[in-house]
Amino acid sequence: MTRFFHRISFPWHSAVWICCLTGMISYSCSDDDLPLLKPTLPGESSDNIRAIRHLGGQTPSYDWTFSYSDGRLVAAGGTVRDPDTTIDGSFSYTSQLSYRHNGVNIYNSSGEKTVVTLNAQGLIDKMTVNRNIYKFYYREGHLAEWEKTVFENSFGQAHQYNSSARFTYNGGNITGIEYKENSGEPVSITIVPSDIPNRNGLLPETISKELGCLGFEHLYYAGLMGLPTTNLVKSISVSYPSQPDKNYTINFEYSIRNGNTILCNYHTPQGSVASASYEY
């Protein structure tokens, strides 16, 4: 039996090209070795916030528990709070965060498919929750504007609801919000900062909806939604231009222990005594 052997020769430039191609393939396959995204958490210290609980009178908000690993928020559990007793405490869910080199995967026990895209600074640029769409815009590291589009189906018809808000800042403190739902009249919110540094990076109470993060505040505490306001909030005044009888102001008082804010006391718009406690 005769055997045939073929000797294959490559020009030197072909060999170089193959080596380069091999290098590119090896590089692309080694992305898993790149460092994982590590957002800057809003708090200044190693005493990361572990829980937020609301007591007394309620405003639309969520209670939260947080878990961390390697300086990242990796799990959170939220429970809805609301002045309507039929809604208050009626829904809870957990959220797992898995970090990639340039992104984060979010898995919610509620079954809602959540996908986020990040901007060059590692902040959420767009988020989709099932069909609903959220867009976020930043200025100097702070959240400056957001837009939300929600789709609902009822009796075979699709309905679209839009809401949005724009923020103003002064010296790193949030001082105003213009909030709008659908084609309704904008609601103006004036925010007065206190002299107390916001060392733990806390969100202002009672206005999570207007801040654009109601129900997913944990993504802010994960460092994915911009810088915290510099000082704790002293008061919030909500103004309805065509319905001044609905206007109200909420004043806040704080308790500090070992440099950490542990309690925020206030009255709800209905006059009920309320508080938010923070654990570290």
Image: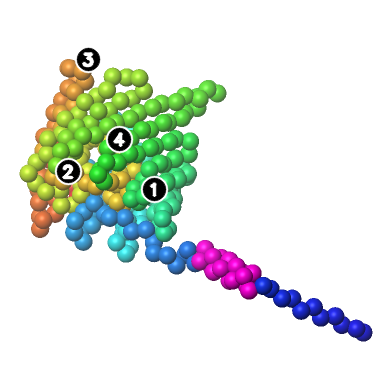
Residue 171, by quadrant, is top left
Gap in angstroms between the C-alphas marked 3 and 2:
31 Å
Q: State left or right for residue 98 relative to residue 158.
A: left
Q: State left or right for residue 221 relative to residue 99.
A: left
Instruction: Locate residue 259, reporting x and y percent.
Output: 11, 56
Q: CB under 8 Å between callouts 1 and 3? A: no
Point out the tag, 2 or 4, that comes first from the N-terminus: 4
Is 14 a magenta residue? yes
* The label number, if any, that marks residue 118 in the structure image: 1
Point out the tag, 4 or 3, that comes first from the N-terminus: 4
Residues drawn in magenta:
12-28
For marks 3 and 2, give the one nearer the viewer: 2
State the residue lying farthest toward the top.
242
In the image, what residue type sits under mark 2? Gly
Instruction: Locate residue 42, reporting x and y percent.
Output: 24, 51
For marks 4 and 3, give the one nearer the viewer: 4
Mark 2, residue position: 172
In the image, what residue type sits under mark 3? Ser
* Quadrant in which the N terminus appears: bottom right
The secondary structure that dominates the magenta segment is helix
State the residue lying farthest toward the left.
195
| Circle 2 crowding by C-alpha within 10 Å: few under 14, some 14–19, many from 20 | some
Mark 4, residue position: 145
* The label number, if any, that marks residue 242 in the structure image: 3
